[in-house]
Amino acid sequence: MEPKIGVYVCHCGSNIAGIVDVEKVAEFARTLPSVVVARDYKFMCSDPGQDLIKKDIKELGVNRVVVASCSPQMHEPTFRRAVQEGGLNPYYFEMANIREHCSWVTENPKEATEKAKALVSAAVRRIYYHQPLENKQVPVHPDTLIVGGGIAGIQAALEIANSGHKVYLVEKEPSIGGHMMQLDKTFPTLDCSACIRTPKMSLVGAHPQIELLTYSEIDYVSGYVGNFRVKIRKKARSVDASLCSGCGICSTKCPIKIDSEFDEKLTKRKAIYSPFAQAVPNVPVIDKEHCTFFLKGKCRACEKFCERNAINFQQEDEILDIEVGNIILTTGYKLFDPSPIKEYGYGRLDNVITSLEFERMVNSAGPTTGKVLLKNGEEPKSIAIVHCVGSRDEKYHEYCSRVCCMYGMKFAHLLKEHIHGSKVYEFYIDIRSFGKGYEEFYNRVQKEGTVFFRGRPGEVTDVAQTPEEKGKLIVQFEDTLVGKQSRLPVDMVVLCSGIEPQADAQETAHKFNISCGKENFFTEKHPKLDPVATMTDGVFIAGCCQGPKDIPDTVAQASAAAARVLALINKGKVEIEADTAFIDEAKCSGCRVCNLLCPYSAISYIEKDKVSRVNEALCKGCGTCVAGCPSGAIIHKHFTNEQINAEIEGILV
């Protein structure tokens, strides 16, 4: 079939046409070999723009289409669909990016126009050698894996399970709940955190479509969208969950006491414990690192007092091998440790505490039964709350953690509520109260008498300079609104630490074949148009593992991820791109270089035939194997040497 190429140059409003002379580019395109029509149009992605392509295919016999417009990431699927609806194979389409690669990065209009011509020439030369390709379809397994049992994981699990589909919910801690279970109240409505969270946890624990795997971790993931195989390590609790009634007598009788992680080490837990009273499942776990029996072979007090004989010291880890069609990662966050900020004195000065320590202290179910206390057991009468600890700071994290301003103001309200007559001071850079009801909450806290100082403290010290400062913590700061340096003596300092990705984020990303950004939060497919998908089809992300966010945004993103999964399940099959790598086994030497290079584990060595083979469902068409093959045995469909060389020649003309 002799190529008849149609070229369509988009104005993109003024995004392209404001710099590039699109009429001249279209005029130039008409002079290129095999081009039968070249047009410019205001918005090619619009229905009228797509209709131009379909009309020319039918009336002028166009059988190759080049669109010079924006990024293929944005609209390549749009134009492929238009070409297909016009009666052509969708791979008889090529896109020249004259927006991101030209008009947006080139200031000189003349140079931008010449560059656009070169990009169009390259696309025309390349499309001459395009071949028709067919996308493949694979079935989608109806079960879903969710990793992380915080509010995001719980929400996503319930959304999918309530539609009648099975969910495996994996949580590394002994109970689901996440950080939200540590909180007292939630801003701006001041709902009791446990009150709104516990019913959802109970629903998850009792749901017939949810298999809850707490105290478990992911060992290995293989497969592709619709067909993942996952190995889960269900760690030994040393307690038989089928026999345990959750009475708690074992924990009561245990003589060993260790700092409680759930209570931020403000109180003790036992070596056999449940992290909190509302734990789901309500089955304790034995901490083998501190249990006397596992360390010395003695004690066994928990076993002696357990009436149901649920203690099992010989219990071993269990490996579960499951198949799922989709995966949602909701692995959450950890709080920034302010210890490296020496000037704030955390860990060195008494009564300098973190936000989560304050949350546990002010919680009625916490270690102090809701009383905010100093180390000496007295109530503080003056409290400084420092914002942006570890956030918006080039030394630590440049990003805003989004929740610190609001929870800092929530603390101010709770202090006024718990300690009548207390003086509360907030030290901030900028107040960011961006959500529904947030600005109103800010105004409320101001009216309650909280004093706001615009300026990050330079130091927190206990070195007194006046009698009034003796026995106090002194906050040294500059109030930037008045340009004045000041010292403020207070009884307690609360540090509003920022949100960080989990310490094992890189390891988790590697397991699931996704990527992390600069700060180690998981990278979404597109920050605006696809914030829940990843570059690995079938793997979705939600909550703070993707970036800092508050509870409403986390819940919304979890529901969005669940909706994406349900769409794939209900469709029953998923289409796989055709532009993948292919190994010519007659040329393959079996050296396995490609196996080592493939970032998606899409290439397997076939021992019987002594050759490597590509799993097209896993292949993302990155081309790494093509470049690395010493035998030249790997062909990248839709990116053949002939096509690439033609494109290079076209851009150099």
Image (spheres, rainbow, N blue to C red):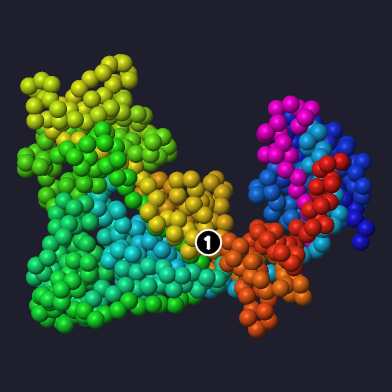
Residue 103: image location, x then y, percent: 71, 34
Considering depth in this image, is 148 or 363 the residue closer to the camera? Answer: 148
Asked whether residue 519 appears in the rendered view, the answer is yes
- The residue positioned 67% from the left and 34% from the top of the image is 104
Residue 127 vertical placement versus 592 (above, below): above
Decide if residue 225 is on the left or right side of residue 188: right
Q: Is 92 included in the stretch rendered in magenta?
A: yes
Q: Quadrant of the N terminus?
A: bottom right
Residue 568: image location, x then y, percent: 56, 66
Residue 87 vertical placement versus 114 (above, below): below
Decide if residue 80 is on the left or right side of residue 279: right
- The residue positioned 24% from the left and 81% from the top of the image is 314
Considering depth in this image, is 450 or 237 the residue closer to the camera? Answer: 237
Residue 365: image location, x then y, percent: 16, 54
Magenta range is 85-112
- The residue positioned 78% from the left and 59% from the top of the image is 640
Decide if residue 605 is on the left or right side of residue 282: right
Indicate the amino acid at tag 1: Asn
Considering depth in this image, is 551 or 478 the residue closer to the camera? Answer: 478
Residue 648: image location, x then y, percent: 80, 47
